[in-house]
Amino acid sequence: MEKSNRRNFLKMAGVAAAGLGAVGLSQVSAAKAAPENPLEKYKTIAVHARQDGAVALVDQVVENGVLRAGVDLTFPPLQFRDPGTNEPMGYCVDITNAIAADLGVTVEWVELPFAELIPGLQAGQFDWSGIGLTIRPQRAQAVRFISEPLFMEDSILLVNNDFTFSDLSELNDAGVTFSNLTGSAQDASAKLQFPNATYTTFEAMQDSLLEVATGRAQVSLVALWNAIPFIDENPDAPVYIWEGGSLFADMNTIMLPHGDEKTAFWLENWMRYHAAHKLQEGLWAKWQGENLAKLEEYSKPR
Amino acid sequence: MNYKFQWNLISRNWDTLLEGLVVTYQVAALAIVLASILGLVLALMRLSSRRWLSLLAQVYIEVGRTLPLYVFLLWLYFGLAVALGITLKSFQAGVLALGLIAAAYMAEIYRAGIMAVDRGQFEAARALGLTAPQIYGDVVLPQAVRIILPAAGNQFVGIFKGAAIVSVIGVADLMFHTRELSLKFFRPFEFYTTSGAILIASTLIFAALVAVLERRLGWGR
């Protein structure tokens, strides 16, 4: 009895191995056989495409009385949880609440890790994002970004004290290790600007910055308002912000599914109207003013 | 939901996934070696007549069996670096975390196998004047291995599955590349399904090898 059980088990394992081998071979041969369109790899299919006659999201939200906003609440001071009350707060939270107030609805915060927000939107887990994402062209194939900025994101270099360089070109070397947030715009931009450097990525922002503090990575390309709170919370961390300032400033804005032009237009119109009435400017000063004041102090090795 | 699958992305990135799988195998293999050696040492300590040795091993085994791997991994990689300045490379930390935790389980597996050998074997070997290393090396362990192997095989499979977690500290293994690719192309279903299938197949192959070894050693006869 035992022998036949083992025999059956071995047969099953053999089939699995053969199957794995067959899949591998078929994929290789498929890749070799198909003529390659160089643009094919950039093609993604937009889901939730709203054809004529479909109900716009903004109308659905008003009808349902609730806006499902996709967020990752781990990025102070843009969007995070109050340590005392655990309530969502921050610049993007205030903007989303203001949008909901104008629509006369409540907000349901649909929390997902940052890296899962686009798949989450594609899966219909929320209506539109309650935070801003960088308008990377590759992302724009999968989602619709509104054309008005939620904010402009300055990306700076957080550097370990033991690492010095006089020119940015020195970072483009295999001996320099970058530690970035997995799937972030900064990670993608760093790999374009410094293709010869070595990269490691982490799912948690804190971990990627800690990697620089421990010296295992020399530098991280990170948003200014991620670097400053990290230094605030870790005053003994041997890191500093490169004195050369912002490498670039990316537009970050709300994303929603492709094809819903009415909702996109409504959001863009809302942003333009309230920008003229200085809502965004006031909230930005409220949430970012302190950060910007610390920039010069944190731009020296500590 | 109108989702269109793009399985061609898997074939385009097959080499990257395969590179990651090799790293997963390396981490698991080294962790298995570490757990096997350290586990045996701990088992012998646990069986020692010297009380302090036995107690030391017992503490290690209890902590190892109750400590979550994820917590220990982060502590080893980040905690030691920040608090004590001990900076392990991510690969080293991954192997150590897996191996040190698994050693606690292996110790109990070894101990159960050794204790299953008839006491008469120990006494006869001692009566023949064999030393302790000779008793364990030539008499007890060869008999115990038939009992140890099935449980050890299960543990090795567990180590292999546990190796999937080391990507959280940046080890460029299969799960690391799967996550990066799924984010790059926004195709989590295709990439995670493929990686899951690869890991299942690998686990089945490994379990089959253990089964062959069991049969060769005459398990059950």
Image: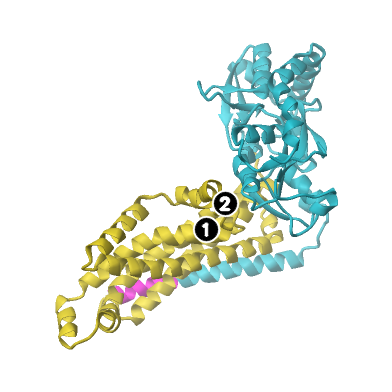
Q: Position of residue B114 (x, y in %)?
A: 25, 72
Is residue A147 positioned above or below A188 on the image? above
Q: Identify the chain drawn in cyan.
A: A
Q: Is residue A149 above or below residue A190?
A: above
Task: Give the Cα separation between the discs numbered 2 and 1.
Answer: 8 Å
As drawn, is B80 to the left or to the right of B2? left
Dot 2 corresponds to which residue?
B169
Q: Nearer the viewer, residue A193 or A277?
A: A193
Q: Residue at x 17, y 88 (%)?
A: B128
Q: What residue span does the magenta drawing correspond to? A: A1-12
Which chain is yellow in the picture? Answer: B
Q: Amino acid at mark 2?
A: Ile
Of the image marks 2 and 1, the number of the one nearer the N terminus:
1
Callout 2: SS? helix
Q: Secondary structure at mark 1?
A: helix
Task: Say which residue label 1 marks.
Answer: B94
Position of A27 compared to A145: left or right?
left
Answer whether labels 2 and 1 touch (C-beta < 8 Å): yes
Q: Position of residue A230 (x, y in %)?
A: 63, 35
Q: Which mark is residue A263?
A: none
